[in-house]
Amino acid sequence: MQLHIFTLEQNNVTAYLLTPFAREHMPAQLTQKAFAGKLIDPLQGPLKDNVAINPEFLVAMHETVRDVMVNDADVTAEAETQLNGFVFIIDRRAPEGSDIPKEDIIGIFLVNERKTDASRYRPNPDYQLISAKGGPQLPPAVEAELLKRLGE
């Protein structure tokens, strides 16, 4: 997911906000949750330690991950292989074939008797929306649904 810088002027103060919407695709009405965060120092750009993350965006993102991924074929297939356990939802920016850093684990589904459901999704409190590897790279179906929801 590419994050774009959106400038907002209020009372002679400029805020530099991050949103997944490019200017040409920006909905007419944007709510607070449509902004992933705010740049602390606009000269440094959207780097890991330079963004104050918007908790409302994270809530919307995790709700979308939960609602979309619970029916994902890979998630249900992985759940069916475990009597009890976990299915991890991983940010696609994570390196393949190695240990996944905790900041790249978006969340988990708890598996019970080879099944999971939306009520068993748990966001990872250590997930970093923006890490040293860059911004979020959500599963494509999640990204599409999130943009839809944020634009409503």
Image: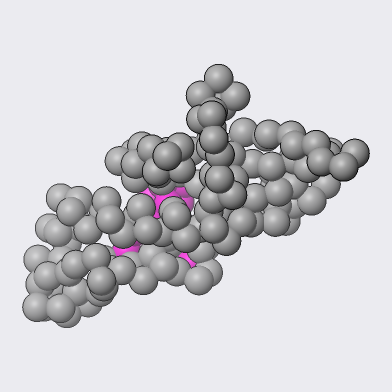
Position of the C terminus, as image quadrant, is top left
| Residue appearing at x 53%, y 69% in the figure | 126
Residue 63, by quadrant, is bottom left
Residue 94 vs residue 131: left or right?
left
Whether residue 81 is visible: no
In the displayed orientation, state which residue is furthest to the top: 24
Span shown in magenta: 88-102
Residue 132 vs residue 76: left or right?
right
Q: Height in image: 104 above or below 124?
A: above
Give the image location of residue 77, x and y in percent.
12, 58
| Magenta span main SS | loop
| Residue appearing at x 62%, y 33% in the figure | 4
Residue 152 part of the magenta segment: no
Residue 75, by quadrant, is bottom left
In the displayed orientation, state which residue is furthest to the right: 12
Q: Height in image: 32 above or below 29?
A: below
| Residue appearing at x 9%, y 78% in the figure | 113
Whether residue 107 is visible: yes
Give the image location of residue 48, x and y in percent.
67, 53
Give the image location of residue 30, x and y in percent.
56, 39
| Residue appearing at x 22%, y 58% in the figure | 70
